[in-house]
Image (tube, grey):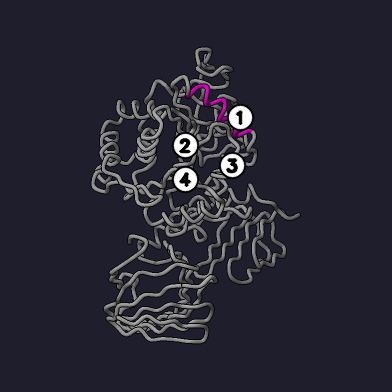
Amino acid sequence: MIVPVILCGGSGSRLWPLSREAYPKQFLDLTQSGQSMLQMTVSRLQTLAQIASPLVICNQDHRFLVAEQLHRIGIDSAGILLEPVARNTAPAVALAAFAALDDDPDAVLLVLPADHRIDNVSAFHQGVESALAAAEADYLVTFGIVPLAPETGYGYIERGESLDLSKSNLSEPNSSAFEIKRFIEKPNKEKAEQYLADECFTWNSGMFLFRASRFLAELKQYAPTIYAACEQAHKQAYRDLDFIRIDKQAFTNCPSDSIDYAVMEKTQAGAMVPLDAGWSDVGSWSAIWDISQKDSAGNVAVGDTLLQETSNSVVYSDSRLVATLGIDDAVVIETADAVLVTNKNQVQNVKSLVTSLKLQSRDESATHKVVYRPWGSYESICASDRFQVKKIVVNPGQKLSLQMHHHRAEHWIVVKGTAEVTCEDKVFTLKEDQSTYIPLGHRHRLANPGKITLELIEVQSGSYLGEDDIVRFDDDYGR
């Protein structure tokens, strides 16, 4: 069986301010398809032959986002592996390989980033079938994207001779796999134009297909420290519902490295299958422009927008009217708390803005005004030194932790639905237009016992209003 391994880490900082650390691009509907990038990645696998339930790898903060998004499209995962710290793709895939081998000693892993777009699903499936023949012959296969432009933002692969797969275990081996001559770092424009004119060069997609056991054998040979740390972290992992919690201490000791550097550039068993399937890594606002439907002036406009004398631009409105006049090749992205304005040829540098925001300890680098939690969400409406107003949304049947605050009191006003409130030893119900007061230092809990979404306004007052002023006594989500 083919076990999909969905790499769901990363912050997508080049797509700021829409993509942020707490809610990055893999969870967003960037293509206006009605599905997030993660959901699209999983959905395109469902008609693939010999496909098993996916293993998804993400950081702990995103675990409930992953679970909820898979649930919405009716997908049961084989497990959601929680990385306690980020260690790049080689350790992440090693963890998935160990997990897959627990269930199937012959498992073949199809490693896919969660944030890629593929338009031609049929061609993608054909590419996987071609790669399977090489994987069954114990090759480590990567997919090379047939280039459409002299792209300087991607690495490249130069292919060698066609592989002879006549001894493959498959009844009809496919010979469209090639030796890998070399991997090439992101080139300058002149080199990229040369590669575009030579059919031996493809973009490096970051997608792979190989036997789990073969990958681990090569990892053990070429990156033994990574292998040993991941083996130990896997042995000490444990299941928590759909989640596989990786041992933090063992995994923290693991070096950080990509599959390419740790294994693919060193192994003698590497192979490449060309893929021409309408692929995009959706890695920047210019990539969004490339793949999106445009108006007669070449504009991509989303949301409440008014464009005049504007051409070849991306204009995105999230919360208010955005009007442009007399611009070309521009990117204008509006969210409730931040606006990005740049030229399309500068979009690869957007991540430098995010770095600057982090250095200034600005919340806009990591979170949106709406912050999602496993029980629902909250949105900051108004804030000052001594008070803050939030809108709290609690999904049906969910509840917040039993908690208390050292520095703030809270007023709750229900505006929709029914709330079950715990305050010290009292438990009572609030309906629409009813309110309550939670004094500083009192244990309290908010729950939604109803069948519709609970919405309330929370007014916080006190000397400190940070989210870290929470002492939890009981929590359904293991925080």
Gap between marks 1 and 4 measured at Cα? 24 Å
Q: Please give the name of the residue rendered at 46% of the width and 78% of the height, measured from the top-left corner.
A: 419
Label 3 to label 4: alpha-carbon separation: 15 Å
Q: How far apart in space, not on screen, are marks 4 and 2 (Cα)? A: 15 Å
For label 3, the residue is: 44
Q: How far apart are marks 3 and 2 (CA)?
A: 14 Å
Q: Name the residue nearer the viewer: 244 or 431.
A: 431
**Is residue 386 visible in the rendered structure shown here?**
no
Looking at marks 1 and 3 on the same chain, the residue that comes earlier in the sequence is marked by 3
258 over 319 or under it: above or below: above
Q: Is mark 4 on a helix, strand or loop?
A: loop
Q: Which mark is residue 111?
A: 2
Span shown in magenta: 123-135
Residue wearing tag 1:
126
Sequence-wise, the earlier of marks 3 and 4 is 3
Choose between 439 and 314: the one closer to the eye.
439
For label 1, the SS is helix
Query: Looking at the image, is 184 positioned above or below residue 425?
Result: above
Nearer the camera: disc 1 or disc 4: 4
- Graded by Cα atoms within 10 Å as few (under 14), some (14 to 19) or many (20 or more), the crowding at tag 2 reads many
Q: Are marks 1 and 2 in contact (CB under 8 Å)?
A: no
Circles 3 and 4, Cβ within 8 Å, touching? The answer is no
Q: In the image, what residue type sits under mark 2?
A: Val
Q: Where is residue 361 in the image (x, y as percent from the top left)?
A: 35, 65
The three-letter code of the residue at mark 1 reads Gln
Image coords of residue 228 (percent x, y)? 26, 34
Q: Nearer the viewer, mark 4 or mark 2?
A: 4
Q: Are marks 4 and 2 in contact (CB under 8 Å)?
A: no
**Is residue 342 highlighted in magenta?**
no
